[in-house]
Image: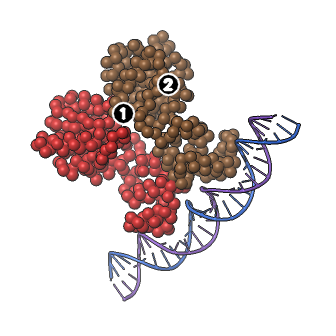
Chain colours: A red, B brown, C blue, D purple
Amino acid sequence: MFKKVLIAEDLDSISQTIIHTLEELSITNIQQVKYCDDAYIKIKKAQTENEPFDLLITDLSFKQDHRKNKLINGEELIAAVKSFQPSIKTIVFSIEDKSFKIKSLFNNLEINAYVIKGRNSIEELKKAINSIYNNETGILLPKTTNTLTEKSIIEIEPYDISLLTLLSKGLMVNEIATEFKNSTIIPNSNSSIEKRINKLKIYFKANNNVHLIAMAKDMGLI
Amino acid sequence: MFKKVLIAEDLDSISQTIIHTLEELSITNIQQVKYCDDAYIKIKKAQTENEPFDLLITDLSFKQDHRKNKLINGEELIAAVKSFQPSIKTIVFSIEDKSFKIKSLFNNLEINAYVIKGRNSIEELKKAINSIYNNETGILLPKTTNTLTEKSIIEIEPYDISLLTLLSKGLMVNEIATEFKNSTIIPNSNSSIEKRINKLKIYFKANNNVHLIAMAKDMGLI
DNA sequence: GATTTTTTTACGGAAAACCGTAAACGGAAT
DNA sequence: ATTCCGTTTACGGTTTTCCGTAAAAAAATC
């Protein structure tokens, strides 16, 4: 079994349970931090001392408070850690259940497992740890019905996200066009942007821009 | 100390910690449920058997799954429970930190304490339990700066919420007007609705309707 | 009950979204 | 080079939002 595990989780009400679970799996060296920055430092230090962590279990969203942190969420943490220790195993333990977001974690950060916090997540977490230790990479997806189908996930590109984000910030089509031109993002004409927005509206069955943004917010797209 | 306590919390990773905390406070009869409906049934049953619960500790948001539930969140649960057992003490334990929402819980549901899930929430939860047992009603607010000021909270009325909700569903001003007329909500003229939306936009410094709805979503208003 | 004040409604012009059509552009294939 | 095809851009007309002003109605004050 894993020898040295780090837990990055801000809510004490959750981290305590994870620790308890790891103890049940006879893991002896369990460390825990409440901030991503602390996690980064600990993993870095452990590696330089030739006693690296085997496994990182991290949440995605961390509350912001008085402390100024460089790494503000689990995604940034994983990316930062893998930059110097790509071999580390990672489990994301989060309440986020939007499959397109989970997918992106496997694709972009190459995490080893994703466990959704829920009514029986402890068991799933145990399974995930065992699977990874036996070198199986598995996606633990929820059984809940998702509004987005497998197919539809693929078609939402970063371009759409930027577009929706700018829209949600109150920019007009005109302003978005100049914004895209400044960032050399194409297409960037008023017409194309209008067309793309329209496509998204048809796609999500939204009545108008307001509706579209409300739905995007609900789905966690932006 | 309290004799009989019920925990309503869907995430097992959190409920385990709460149970552990209550045990430390020498509370012997601790029961736990993962659905609001189950909480309601348990409390109801306990009362009819003349062994009522002293305290309810509940989350606000519960994940939805295959089960069809009548009560879908903590607010509904508390309202339902207080309808037949108004004397029960209630603590809300949630990650929600928008002060206007917390305020409304104290005002409308007369909860006894609100503990925000965070990096030291276990300690706060203990304090809250002790305080309530000693008949002190206290608001445990976070130290984080809130975008909404105390004054601004008051002025957001249910009317505004309905308005924002309908907007976010993609209805046009015209349609909202007829909707309001059907529900005999006043004011319900196009002009008045436009004016009210404009007021909200000035208030929240939103550029347009899209921006306004995005902000309302972010703040948890809708 | 008359007057003042506030709220609600009505209206109108300018700006932006909405939506279809057509032209211009840029690769890929031949 | 030319054709083909998909993408991007341009344009124009309609609808809705946006925003100010004024009238009408309701509420408050005297």
Local SS, label 1:
loop
Residue B145 locus on image (x, y percent): 43, 39
Residue D1 locus on image (x, y percent): 37, 89
Report the front residue among B19 and D30: D30
Residue placed at 47% from the left, 45% from the top?
Answer: B218
Chain that bears disc 2: B
Q: Determine which residue is flagged by label 2.
A: B111
Q: Amino acid at mark 1?
A: Gly
Badge number at residue B50: none
Looking at the image, is A194 positioned above or below residue A153? Answer: below
Looking at the image, is D3 positioned above or below residue B43? Answer: below
Residue B8 locus on image (x, y percent): 42, 26
Residue placed at 27% from the left, 32% from the top?
Answer: A18
Residue placed at 14% from the left, 44% from the top?
Answer: A47
Badge number at residue B118: 1
Q: Amino acid at mark 2?
A: Ile
Q: Residues within 10 Å of mark 2 (few under 14, many from 20)?
A: many
Q: Residues within 10 Å of mark 1 (few under 14, many from 20)?
A: many
Q: Quadrant of the N terminus of chain B?
A: top left
